[in-house]
Amino acid sequence: RRRLDTRCRARSVRAPATMGGGPTPGDAGAGAADVEALLREFPALGRTEDGRVKCSLTGHVMHAKPEVVRPYVQGKRFAQASAKARAMDALKQFEPHIVRSKFLPDKLFCRITGRYLAASERAVEQHSAGRRFERGVEALSRKKTETGAKNVLLTERDPTLVEEERREEAAREKRKREAEAEAEASNASDAKARAAKAAAKAAAAEAAASAA
């Protein structure tokens, strides 16, 4: 009887490892295969160094489990990001003259005018039909002819640095105008003083002549 009780207890301990209640090696393998299938279906998904899954469109990182990854790719956030990515891909037809901004993710950069545009075909069409764009094309054509350079398109710079330089240039222009105004005022004051001195000298000479 003691042997029978021992065997029953041993079976009760081993049962959860072989019966229902936890994933079997076959279940784990099937889950990994499902995740790999999702990665192939959605190129925006990739593996991180620690084996998790990351979405390049949103930066979202999740566990590499089908019950986690599948609801994500079926969700609203991923759908919106995918639609936006497709729209940006469609705008590649305007390259190299109008390209995606390196500094402003939701903007396009015109390498002819140096202007930023909304990331839409309509915005590009309106911009390219404008007078500013035409003048930019003419200016770059002249530059290409005069210099013989093959690439005369503008290169996008960090807008923050460009704005800082613009403010510094505006400050220099202001100081220059103030200095010119001060010099002009000083010259006017000197001229007025010289005129007054000359008038006083003339008056003195006239008074001396009258006295004589």
Image: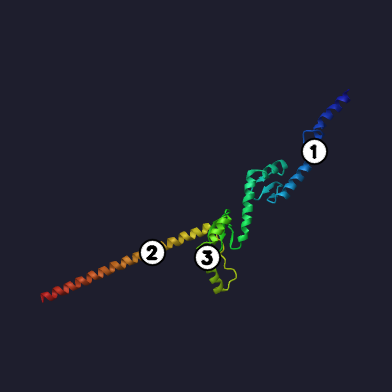
Q: Secondary structure at mark 3?
A: helix
Q: Secondary structure at mark 1?
A: loop
Mark 3 lies on residue = 134
The kind of residue on which mark 1 rests is Thr
Q: Earlier in the sequence, mark 2 or mark 1?
A: 1
Rounded to the nearest angstrom, the CA distance separating label 2 from label 1 is 81 Å
- Image quadrant holding the C terminus, namely bottom left
Q: Which residue is mark 2?
A: 177
- Look at 19% across and 73% down and name the residue there: 202
Which residue reaches farthest left? 212
Gap between marks 2 and 3 measured at Cα: 33 Å
The residue nearer to you, when weighing 10 against 97, is 97
Q: Amino acid at mark 3?
A: Glu
Q: Nearer the viewer, mark 1 or mark 3?
A: 3
Q: Estimate the x, y position of residue 60 in percent, counting from the top left.
A: 64, 46
Give the answer, above or below, for where 197 lies relative to 168: below
